[in-house]
């Protein structure tokens, strides 16, 4: 089974691209979705213990957690120490399930793939990218997003140029969705037709 890591900076179109892989029948493990689920389950108690006042009615209040992190960015490490092991366990279960099912290819959608040194856990990396102007326009359309918040997020991410330099595959989402879809299809074709030793 080939494991493809999918990553890209905020606003590059990674979530849309991941859905395209899924529509082509490739199992996708979405780290963001895993975090979202954990914020309503296993991660609630440890996050409340580390960040008092950030949970309400049995789930993590993301807005309050973001506020605390913005006030003290050094706390990101504390949060990561709680969340990353839980996400890794969900990933392990996903991989085992698909290995048992005989899947030829799976995608691990990992937003901070290079930042968390996750490239060692995958066979190849696809980086989703687009023109910086398009990226900024997409991100600033998101509810509650500001230029300052965008700058803070970018400061915590490996620059796009560096990600592209490390990538095995680059998916450019600057153009129409059909263009992205054909790039995804070409990668799926390449990886599923490979004979591995």
Image (spheres, rainbow, N blue to C red):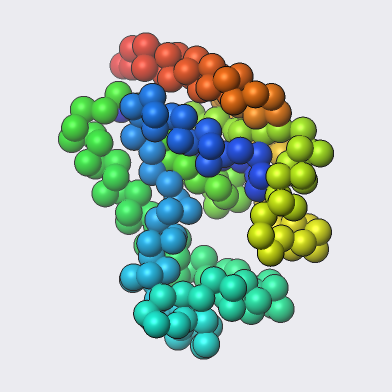
Residue 146 point in image, percent of width and height: 77, 61
User: Is residue 63 depicted above or below 158 in this figure?
Assistant: below
Picture coordinates of residue 47, whole percent (x, y): 46, 78
40 sits left or right of 116 in the view: left
* Position above or below: 18 against 1: below
Q: Which residue is farthest left?
A: 100
Q: Where is 168 relative to 133, above or below?
A: above
- Which residue is at the front of the view, 180 or 155? 180
The N terminus lies in which quarter of the figure? top left
Hey, which quadrant is residue 130 in on the image? top right
Q: Nearer the viewer, residue 50 or 145?
A: 145
Give the residue drawn at x 43%, y 46%: 30
Q: Position of residue 79 (x, y in %)?
A: 52, 71
| Whole-percent x, y for residue 22 in the image | 39, 32
Report if residue 158 is visible in the image: no
Which residue is painted at 57% across and 20% down in the image?
A: 178
């Amino acid at each position: 089974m080939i494991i493809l890591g999918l990553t890209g900076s905020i606003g590059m179109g990674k979530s849309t691209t991941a859905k395209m892989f899924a529509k082509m029948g490739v199992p996708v493990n979405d780290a963001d979705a895993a975090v979202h689920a954990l914020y309503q389950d296993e991660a609630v108690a440890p996050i409340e213990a580390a960040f008092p006042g950030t949970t309400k009615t049995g789930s993590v209040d993301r807005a309050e957690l973001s506020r605390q992190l913005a006030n003290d960015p050094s706390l990101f490490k504390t949060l990561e120490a709680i969340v990353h092991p839980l996400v890794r366990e969900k990933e392990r279960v996903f991989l085992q399930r698909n290995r048992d099912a005989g899947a030829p290819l799976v995608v691990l959608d990992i937003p901070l793939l290079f930042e968390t040194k996750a490239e060692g856990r995958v066979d190849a990396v696809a980086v989703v990218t687009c023109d910086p102007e398009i990226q900024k326009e997409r991100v600033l359309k998101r509810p509650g997003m500001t230029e300052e918040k965008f700058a803070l997020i970018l400061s915590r991410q490996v620059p796009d140029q560096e990600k592209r330099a490390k990538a095995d595959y680059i998916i450019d989402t600057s153009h129409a969705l059909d263009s992205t879809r054909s790039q995804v299809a070409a990668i799926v074709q390449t990886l599923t037709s490979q004979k591995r030793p």
